[in-house]
Amino acid sequence: MVLNNEQPSRLSQSERLARMRLARSSNIGPITFRKLLERFGTARDAIAQLPDIIAKTKGFRKIVLANREDTVAEIELAQKCDAKPIIWGDPEYPALLARIEDAPPYFYAIGRIALLTRPAIGLVGARNASANGCGFARKLSHGLCAAGYVVVSGMARGIDGAAHEAALQTAPNGEGGTIAVLGGGVDVIYPREHRELYGKLCEQGCIISEMPPGLNPQARHFPRRNRIISGLSYGTVVIEAGRNSGSLITARFAAEQGRDVFAVPGSPTDPRAAGPNSLIRDGAILCDSADVILDSLRDAVQNTHLFEDFHQFNTEARSPNINTDPSHYDDIAQSIVRDAENSGSKESSQSLEIVSPSEETPPIMRTEDQSDKVLDLLSTTPLLIDDLIRASKLPANSISGLLTELELAGRVERHPGNRVSRIAK
């Protein structure tokens, strides 16, 4: 089940560096990058034409070419953490990801890079997921990996972490596996409690990010991260997500990219079920088992329309057909505006704050925080207290006391068989 996205030859080192410089230039986003390669054939030729482009597109956002020395320094920083740049045109660049309009010009990868060429499914959901939700995520991830598929997620708390962990346990050496797409630099562990998971992903899975190494994640980075999760995947599954959850952004990207959207239904009294239930009302595929996903994937893998008009623009030898008519640059100017809109920020790449990963020690959790954690793990479906203890990673005596307090406060309800559930508000 390896996707055939091999290219005739590798890019030359000079072209690789030119593409990285072009991608890191201010106000040249993924759409503009792609438009420039379509127009000029190579990044080197596009860079040579930048002065003319800037002159012809005056009135739009200023373009500043990334410094060669800064780009080399970024590459050297990536090498220190064993990260490899995967550039548009490389044989390892995922064909399905390259198909989306705003595919990243390049990204960094650590771990089993071969996973990037295998059929994948995105699996996302709430950070404050219930134990039942995390359990179902593990079940789906196990079934998908056992069938040879790669599970793609974002290494966040809750559903993401559960999906990655199950995939690593299921397919350490097989065709299946897992890819984590980060919102910060590929070497930045976020959240901090996933340090151990991060280490396992580096060894047995694959970690990727389009951000420069050392960049701490910021809120505006995650929507960009989400379009990569869906772009790598034939379909995206949403498990537990509030109405304003970022997981719904991933689902929207998947639909816009022509991929399947799956949603796991939940109780209407649980706010975390609002997102999946609304997706199902809007036409998403109701998912109650891995078999539902696998049946759809068998059809999707054979859909050649996903790869129509797929180009890597690896024709370095071709001569650019350059037109000096100012109207010739209208589409490039429009792509600059669209990139700015997609980025959600008016700041240029030069304003990003590069920092070294800190070695902070996680703060000790207060009692009220522990109560919130227990409530987040519970849903209106009864859960074994033993499972709650395992999911919370809190001592059994702490759980007992917290449940007593929450029961007195009218927040939880006990059930026969040593089970407990959250009381719907």
Image (tube, rainbow, N blue to C red):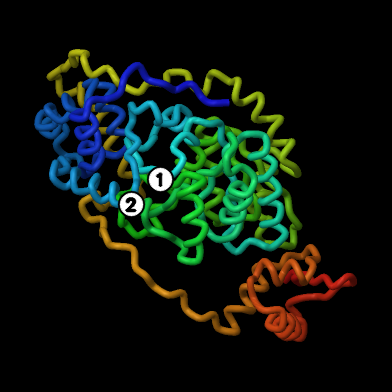
Work out whether mark 2 precedes mark 1 in sequence or the reverse, and give the earlier one.
2
At horizontal 45% and vertical 32% (from top left) the residue drawn is 97
* Rendering coords of residue 338 (x, y %): 33, 38
Badge 2 element: loop
Q: Residue furthest right?
A: 416
* Rendering coords of residue 15 (x, y %): 21, 28
The residue singled out by tag 1 in the image is 110
At horizontal 70% and vertical 56% (from top left) the residue drawn is 135
Report if the CB atoms under discs 2 and 1 are less than 8 Å apart.
yes
Badge 1 element: strand
The amino acid pointed to by label 2 is Cys
The residue singled out by tag 2 in the image is 81
Q: Is residue 150 left or right of residue 206?
A: right
Q: Is residue 76 left or right of residue 343?
A: left
The answer to whether 52 is drawn above or below residue 246 in the figure is above
Residue 361 image-quadrant placement = bottom left
At horizontal 48% and vertical 29% (from top left) the residue drawn is 96
Residue 354 image-quadrant placement = bottom left
* Rendering coords of residue 287 (x, y %): 72, 42
The number of numbered discs placed on residues in the rendered structure image is 2
Q: Is residue 241 left or right of residue 22?
A: right
The answer to whether 187 is drawn above or below residue 43 in the figure is below
Res. 121 visible in picture: no
The answer to whether 288 is drawn above or below residue 374 in the figure is above
The answer to whether 157 is drawn above or below residue 122 in the figure is below
* Rendering coords of residue 373 (x, y %): 62, 73
Quadrant of the rendering where the C terminus is positioned:
bottom right
At horizontal 52% and vertical 57% (from top left) the residue drawn is 197
